[in-house]
Image: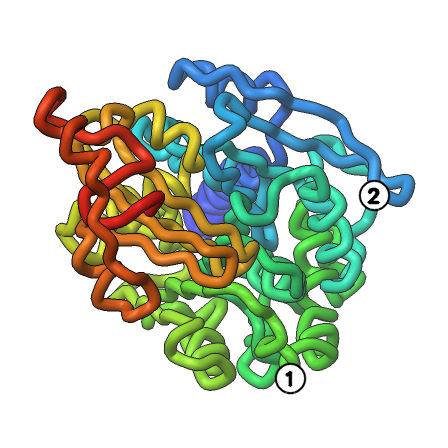
């Protein structure tokens, strides 16, 4: 009997030590990290982040900005529950992504280091805060990325951006699971055991379902091109969420990318699939698409300065209604145009302009002498047309 009691005592002590050890690791591992830890994470990759303390509606929060190229697009990350500015650090420090984009990430209210504020339990509040954070960015060069509970925050902003990317978005109230572990927060006798950051997560979880009901019927009002990446084995935010979104948008606007066998931690377990969506995704092997990508990423002026060789390009922006007609500096690539005030016609060959039926062909005798003397004809003259 004494031996049995001794064994029980030893087992009890071991169990207590293991519990304390596990709890300590869990507490430390999931708690928000200090500014120094955040800085060290990025600086180890040779990146110097700007870590700033910002204020929104009297709430303090931490923002990390990495802006090195004002021409490049800016990817704005919105974390889930729980989450922090470090959730997407692997993507920000990736050499390819870092080369092609600027980044902004921030701690949502309730998830900051040494946080004193409570989560706001409001998608509308979070959306307004996000729009305040990005108010000075060019929307055409802004890519919003929302993970888990960050998904509905991004989706609730109905302004026009370059692109919206969702990872396992929690957007449909009817499939919002309520894990049994939430009872540990709900019961006063066990609430003391819950780490502070998980108390905030529990509060947001318990009200998220009701909050979604205010938005889920109107997701289709979002005007952006949307990509949703979701693991089909996700039980925390079921795959049905993305299927629900898919039913609300036309195929031309919404793309659902399932990841077979992936769970809710896909942003860590499926890095390459996620990275391919954050980087420019070429659909063809055409050099024309490369031109479009360069202009979209860096702007027309940047492309013209970088372009080498002969080229003649026509670009039309359907949103701004801007039209650009560009050729190489020496005019090696032919580019002809006709403008009479009512009609503007352009082509790489004169015969295409003549075939329009809007231009009368006239022989330019003055150009013959110039061609025979110089072997070329200066703009704006041609042999076939006067002042084309």
Q: Residue at the spot x=53%, y=27% of the render? A: 70
User: Is 379 left or right of 117, judged from the image as shown?
Assistant: left
User: Is 4 left or right of 283, judged from the image as shown?
Assistant: right
Name which of mark 2 and mark 1 comes first in the sequence: 2
Residue that mark 2 sits on: 117
219, above or below 385, in the image = below
Q: Residues within 10 Å of mark 2 (few under 14, many from 20)?
A: some
Query: Can you give x and y, in whole percent of width and height, for residue 265 in the image?
Result: 40, 54
Q: Residue at the spot x=71%, y=61% of the render? A: 204
SS of the residue at dot 2? loop
114, above or below 174, in the image = above
Residue 239 occupies quadrant: bottom left
SS of the residue at dot 1? helix
Residue 7 occupies quadrant: top left
Residue that mark 1 sits on: 217
Query: Can you give x and y, in whole percent of width and height, for residue 299 in the image?
Result: 44, 36
- Circle 2 or circle 1, nearest the eye: 1
Query: Can you give x and y, in whole percent of width and height, for residue 20 in the image?
Result: 56, 38
Q: Give 149 or 130, whichever is nearer the viewer.
A: 130
Distance Cα–Cα, label 2 vs label 1: 30 Å
90, above or below 12, in the image = above
Q: Residue at the spot x=53%, y=57% of the render? A: 321
Q: Give 279 or 185, whichever is nearer the viewer.
A: 279
Query: Can you give x and y, in whole percent of width and height, for residue 59 in the image?
Result: 85, 40
Q: Residue furthest right?
A: 58
Q: Which label was assigned to residue 290?
A: none
Q: Give 306 or 103, whichever is nearer the viewer.
A: 306
């Amino acid at each position: 009997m004494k031996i049995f009691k001794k064994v029980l005592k030893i087992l009890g002590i071991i169990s207590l030590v293991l519990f304390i050890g596990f709890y300590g690791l869990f507490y430390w591992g999931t708690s928000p990290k200090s500014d120094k830890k955040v800085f060290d994470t990025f600086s180890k990759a040779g990146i110097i982040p700007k870590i700033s303390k910002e204020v929104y509606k009297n709430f303090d929060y931490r923002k990390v900005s990495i802006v090195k190229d004002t021409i490049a697009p800016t990817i704005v990350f919105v974390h889930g529950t729980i989450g922090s500015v470090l959730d997407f650090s692997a993507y920000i420090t990736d050499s390819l992504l870092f080369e092609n984009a600027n980044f902004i990430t921030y701690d949502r209210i309730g998830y900051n280091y040494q946080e004193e504020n409570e989560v706001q339990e409001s998608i509308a509040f979070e959306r307004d805060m996000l729009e305040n954070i990005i108010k000075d960015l060019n929307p055409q060069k802004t890519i919003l990325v929302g993970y888990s509970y960050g998904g509905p925050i991004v989706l609730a902003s109905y302004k026009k951006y370059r692109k919206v990317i969702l990872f396992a978005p929690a957007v449909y109230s009817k499939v919002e699971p309520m894990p049994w572990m939430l009872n540990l927060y709900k019961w006063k006798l066990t609430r003391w055991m819950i780490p502070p950051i998980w108390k905030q997560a529990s509060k947001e979880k318990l009200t998220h379902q009701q909050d979604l009901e205010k938005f889920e019927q109107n997701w289709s009002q979002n005007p952006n091109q949307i990509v949703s990446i979701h693991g089909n084995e996700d039980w925390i935010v079921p795959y049905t969420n993305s299927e629900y979104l898919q039913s609300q948008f036309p195929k031309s606007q919404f793309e659902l990318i399932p990841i077979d066998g992936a769970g809710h931690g896909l942003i860590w377990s499926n890095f390459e699939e996620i990275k391919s969506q954050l980087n420019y995704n070429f659909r063809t092997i055409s050099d024309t698409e490369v031109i479009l990508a360069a202009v979209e990423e860096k702007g027309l002026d940047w492309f013209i300065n970088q372009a080498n060789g002969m080229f003649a390009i026509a670009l039309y922006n359907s949103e701004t209604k801007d039209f650009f007609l560009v050729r190489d500096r020496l005019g090696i690539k032919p580019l002809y145009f006709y403008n009479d005030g009512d009609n503007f016609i352009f082509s790489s060959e004169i015969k295409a302009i003549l075939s329009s039926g809007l231009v009368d062909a006239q022989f330019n005798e003055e150009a013959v002498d110039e061609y025979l003397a110089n072997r070329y004809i200066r703009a704006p003259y041609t042999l076939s047309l006067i002042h084309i």
